[in-house]
Image (cartoon, rainbow, N blue to C red):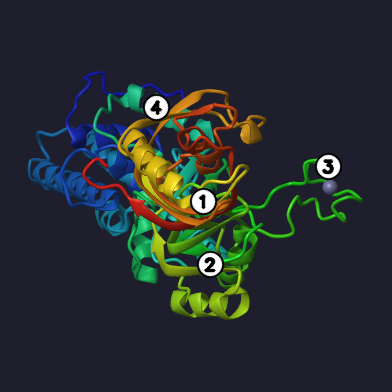
């Protein structure tokens, strides 16, 4: 690419630029048309190239007639100049109409035997069928209903084309990658009868283009299944907990399982989705979490199971719900399963704080309390608590894994029932994230106000169940 442009007059007319290009460089239709991609709409770059070349060919043919009619006045040199440009078009483009015309106009024309080689793309755009075949081959094992093509190119391609554009005064081009993505995308959309999806494609197909070969990478994006779970058995954490002593590596104490608890809601539910989606990994996202020893009843807690690199996406969710119920339904179950976009994960995670949760607490009192005293003090407590701000410093029991700070929470409803002098049952509806056990025990006055102080007794929460999780609407 060291030749000078013969025409010093830097014209921005696409026809003149095209003449300059074909005088200097072998160029394929896509690479030629791409230089004028901003001109005209609803046209493929190859159509732009064809229009430009055909116009030039017709112009030359017209000039040739005029010159031949006035052959006496015209120098023979002009005719050969025109024929020379026509010969360049034959050598430097893949135009199929130029060669028959040359043969007709010039007895001395001999076809070049040299193999065509596009100076801009190394013939990538002439071999898109190979790229497409390879993509079809490599995506065969994946099920998807939309896709997006992306290209990663050796920077030399870009440098070459930038240099070329400066030299030829081209300001109307589009990017190499954009051209290839669109071309391959349109072709595959037709072959698969599937749409190209720009926002959240199920599959990203990356064409990794080096100077003389290419590679295809398939990224199957996560499949997200949302639902609500119930936990009917105490002692099950929401997600897999690595054994504290060995950090999950597996030791004698944990029986080489690496687990602090034998199972979790995550481990009980995920396999039912994993076995049909055939992913490589998974993640469990809950809208908040209940304590390990609390059950989760009522309408259940929202969660999303994210399957990484799934091969199958059209799962029968009703069948999965039934299988869960049959096989682990005594401990946990999952209802209202549905497919959701990945963006839902963020929403569900932040939702823990924006929910109202109802709990039933079974409480034991250290000192006896009569029914009368309970009712009097509990009614007074309700006035102190409902609709008021509760201040909770990070509980002692979670201080090792959560920042030590004071959080403001709210209790929406509070109802109590006296069982005997040492036992009461309390129903509490509170803002998501409220530490209920500490609201009952006071946690050495780290939570204020608290039920122990209000009832003037040392209270402990013996059992806790989540009875409902509601989304807050209208602000609360
Ligand atoms: Zn090319
Ligand atoms: Zn261990």
Q: Residue at x 81, y 55 (%)?
A: 257
- Per the image, the residue denoted by label 1 is 285
* SS for dot 1: strand
Residue 317 % position (x, y): 46, 74
Whether residue 342 is visible: no
Residue 246: image tag:
3
Q: Is residue 76 above or below residue 268?
A: above
Q: Residue 186: which quarter of the image?
A: bottom left
Task: Name the front one of labels 3 and 2.
Answer: 3
Q: Is mark 3 within 8 Å of ligand 2?
A: yes
| Position of residue 433 in the picture relative to residue 446 (left or right) | left
Labelled disc at residue 162: 4
Tell me residue 427's x, y (percent): 42, 53
Mark 1 crowdedness (10 Å alpha carbons): few <14, some 14-19, many ≥20 = some
Of tags 1 and 4, the one toward the viewer is: 1
Q: CA distance from mark 2 to mark 1?
A: 24 Å
Which image quarter is the C terminus in? top left
User: Going from the N terminus, do you reach mark 1 or mark 4 first?
Assistant: 4
Q: Which residue is mark 2?
A: 142
- The residues tagged by marks 3 and 2 sit, at their Cα atoms, a distance apart of 38 Å
The CA distance from mark 3 to mark 1 is: 24 Å
Q: CA distance from mark 1 to mark 4?
A: 46 Å
Closer to the chain start, of discs 3 and 2, is 2
Residue at left offset 25%, top offset 27%: 171
Q: Nearer the viewer, mark 2 or mark 1?
A: 1
Kindly report the distance in space between the C-alpha atoms of the residues bearing marks 2 and 4.
Answer: 37 Å
Dots 3 and 1: beta carbons under 8 Å? no
Q: Are marks 2 and 4 in contact (CB under 8 Å)?
A: no
């Amino acid at each position: 690419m060291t030749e000078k442009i013969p025409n010093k007059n830097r014209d921005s007319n696409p026809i003149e630029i095209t003449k300059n290009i074909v005088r200097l460089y072998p160029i394929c239709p896509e690479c030629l048309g791409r230089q004028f991609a901003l001109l005209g709409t609803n046209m493929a770059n190859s159509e732009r190239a064809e229009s430009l070349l055909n116009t030039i060919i017709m112009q030359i043919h017209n000039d040739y007639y005029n010159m031949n009619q006035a052959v006496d006045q015209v120098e023979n040199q002009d005719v050969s100049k025109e024929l020379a440009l026509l010969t360049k078009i034959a050598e430097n483009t893949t135009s199929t109409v130029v060669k028959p015309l040359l043969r007709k106009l010039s007895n001395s024309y001999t076809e070049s035997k040299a193999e065509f080689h596009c100076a801009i793309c190394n013939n990538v755009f002439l071999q898109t069928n190979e790229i497409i075949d390879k993509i079809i081959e490599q995506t065969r094992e994946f099920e998807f209903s939309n896709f997006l093509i992306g290209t990663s190119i050796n920077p030399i391609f870009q440098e070459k084309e930038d240099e070329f554009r400066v030299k030829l005064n081209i300001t109307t081009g589009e990017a190499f990658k954009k051209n290839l993505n669109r071309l391959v995308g349109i072709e595959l959309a037709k072959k698969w009868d599937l749409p190209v999806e720009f926002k959240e494609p199920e599959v990203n197909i990356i064409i990794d283009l080096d100077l003389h070969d290419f590679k295809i990478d398939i990224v199957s994006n996560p499949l997200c299944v949302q639902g609500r779970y119930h936990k009917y058995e105490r002692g099950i954490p929401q997600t897999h907990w690595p054994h504290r002593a060995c950090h999950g590596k597996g030791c004698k104490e944990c029986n080489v399982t690496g687990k602090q608890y034998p199972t979790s809601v995550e481990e009980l539910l995920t396999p039912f989705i994993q076995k049909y989606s055939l992913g490589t990994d998974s993640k469990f996202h809950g809208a908040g979490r209940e304590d390990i020893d609390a059950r989760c009843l009522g309408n259940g807690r929202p969660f999303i199971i994210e399957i990484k690199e799934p091969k199958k996406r059209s799962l029968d969710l009703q069948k999965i719900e039934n299988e869960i119920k049959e096989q682990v339904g005594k401990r946990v179950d999952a209802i209202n399963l549905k497919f959701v976009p990945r963006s839902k994960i963020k929403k569900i995670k932040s939702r823990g704080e924006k929910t109202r949760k109802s709990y039933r607490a079974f409480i034991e009192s250290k000192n006896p309390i009569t029914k009368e005293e309970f009712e009097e003090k509990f009614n007074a407590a309700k006035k102190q608590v409902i609709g008021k701000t509760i201040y909770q410093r990070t509980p002692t029991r979670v201080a090792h894994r959560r920042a030590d700070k004071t959080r403001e929470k709210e209790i929406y409803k509070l109802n109590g029932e006296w069982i005997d002098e040492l036992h009461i049952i309390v129903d509490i509806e509170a803002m998501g994230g409220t530490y209920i056990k500490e609201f009952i025990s006071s946690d050495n006055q780290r939570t204020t106000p608290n039920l122990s102080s209000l009832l003037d007794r040392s209270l402990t929460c013996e059992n806790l169940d989540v009875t409902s999780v509601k989304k807050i609407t209208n602000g609360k």
